[in-house]
Amino acid sequence: MKNNFPGHTGIQVRHVHLTYVWRAVQRVIFKGLSLTIEPGEFVTIYGDNASGKTSLLKLLTGLQKPDQGDVWVHGINVSVQGVTGAREAGVGFLSQNPVYQILGQTVEEELDYVPGVSDEEKENILNQFGLERRLKVAPQNLSGGERQRLALAVLVLQKMPLLLLDEPTSYLDALQVENLRMYLEKIHAKGTTIVHVTQYPEEAAWGTRTLQLETGKLKELA
């Protein structure tokens, strides 16, 4: 399978301001946030609940537009072009609860939606994510962890150059978490850029670089 994505120029978040307004309540999420992620990095963004982690990923996927500033992904301004632009830039996004990302009636059908993938590739990815015995099962009958793994398997099959993972271990047991970490390291070594968001301290050191997000500000962790 070959995708024609634009040149891999990484991620540039430039002086982004974001405020959520609900009735009479205003909450400032980011005030002048800037961030650069180089192509091929494996970055973990660590922070507590309500620290802005998911908001940052929504900006990178074009699901959320900033009040001010720009978000560039692989040369495309996704703060202007939105989800369509992010897709063109080769962004693969795994949400915390990927139930709405899964469209197939069975696991097998979901994998069949990915064009140009061989049966061998499908078999390998099913084995990798422990879904080889769930081929004929409907997604609604999968556990939360199985749905997460299925959604990630589809992203991997699509060969997206950039993966954004929002709390990908929320429904996984300890063994599955370790398997996921090793697999992410494997695809990162082959060139995939990964942005992994987590609230779990034991995952803060995943990858090649760790950033802590607190009160809308990013800090490099050693």
Image (cartoon, helix red, strand yellow):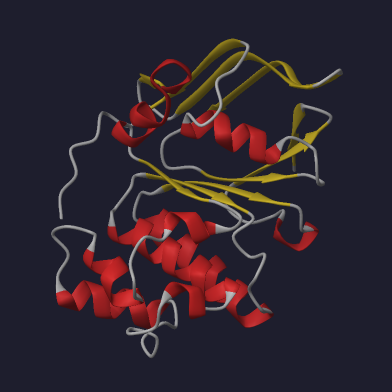
Residue at the (18%, 78%) spot, across then down: 120
The location of residue 89, given as percent across then percent down, is: 33, 32
Residue at the (53%, 69%) spot, across then down: 180
Q: Identify the image quadrant of the C terminus.
A: top right
Q: Quadrant of residue 105?
A: bottom left
Q: Closer to the camera, 83 or 222?
A: 83
Q: Is residue 33 visible?
A: yes
| Looking at the image, residue 196 lies above or below residue 106 | above
Q: Residue furthest bottom?
A: 133
Q: Closer to the camera, 87 or 44?
A: 87
The location of residue 41, given as percent across then percent down, is: 49, 42
Q: Quadrant of residue 179?
A: bottom right
Residue at the (24%, 35%) spot, across then down: 5
Q: Is residue 182 visible?
A: no
Q: Closer to the camera, 42 or 217?
A: 217
Q: Residue furthest front?
A: 23
| Looking at the image, residue 94 lies above or below residue 70 | below
The location of residue 113, given as percent across then percent down, is: 24, 61
Q: Identify the image quadrant of the N terminus.
A: bottom left
In the picture provided, is 31 more to the left or to the right than 74?
right
The location of residue 116, given as percent across then percent down, is: 13, 59
Residue at the (17%, 64%) spot, across then down: 117
Q: Closer to the camera, 27 or 11?
A: 27
Q: Quadrant of residue 211?
A: top right
| Looking at the image, residue 72 lies above or below residue 204 | above
